[in-house]
Image (cartoon, grey):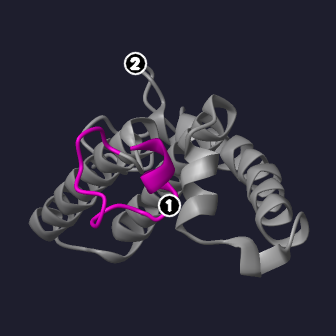
Amino acid sequence: MTTDVSLDAPRSPYARSKRGINWEKWGWIYMRVSGVALVALIFGHLFVNLFLGDGVSQIDFAFVAGKLSDPFWQWYDFFLLWLALIHGTNGMRTIINDYVATASVRRILQGALLSSTVVLLVLGTLVIFTFDPCPAGADPELVASFCAEIL
């Protein structure tokens, strides 16, 4: 006599699938790896912005413009943006899956979460890589004071 589970029994949504990619496992791994990377990136960001130089009083438009003109800081901020947003989105997705019982509401919330994340990633990436504090041909009265020397 065997104790096999009936094939007609409802399948749990948390049961392991024998086919395809296990997205929950990869999401779990991503959260751990990105969490460690984010700790290092955030503390580096805070150290450079708050402890080096004149501290918090140095942070103004010129400071940010200077950082965003350096490719190192562009890529640093790019990785910080992408890791943090995807990390937070994955956490919110988990909360939605855990606490929203209705499938249609869950799909709406996950769709809103996905679309807002994509918009923020695209806009943030554009700002990081296309930011120009002194656009060519701009009215000198409308740009930062340090641009007057360049224009």
* Residue sitting at x 45%, y 21%: 18
Which sits earlier in the primary sequence, circle 1 or circle 2?
2
Mark 2 crowdedness (10 Å alpha carbons): few <14, some 14-19, many ≥20: few
* Residue sitting at x 83%, y 75%: 55
* Residue, far top: 19
Quarter of the image for residue 137 reads: top left
Please say if 40 is above or below 57: above
Question: Which residue is label 2 attached to?
Answer: 19
In this picture, residue 9 sits left or right of residue 14: left
Q: CA distance from mark 1 to mark 2?
A: 28 Å
In this picture, residue 70 sits left or right of residue 141: right
Q: Where is residue 75 shown, x and y percent of the image?
A: 60, 34
Position of the N terminus, as image quadrant, is: top right
Frontmost residue, 12 versus 143: 143
Q: Where is residue 151 shown, x and y percent of the image?
A: 38, 44
> Which span of residues is magenta-colored?
135-151
Frontmost residue, 85 versus 15: 85
Question: Any magenta on residue 69?
Answer: no
Amino acid marked by disc 2: Arg
Please say if 38 is above or below 22: below
Residue 11: give its label.
none
Disc 1 is placed on an element classified as: helix
Frontmost residue, 55 versus 93: 55
* Residue sitting at x 63%, y 35%: 70
* Residue sitting at x 27%, y 49%: 10
Question: Which residue is label 1 attached to?
Answer: 88
In this picture, residue 81 sits left or right of residue 141: right
Amino acid marked by disc 1: Gly
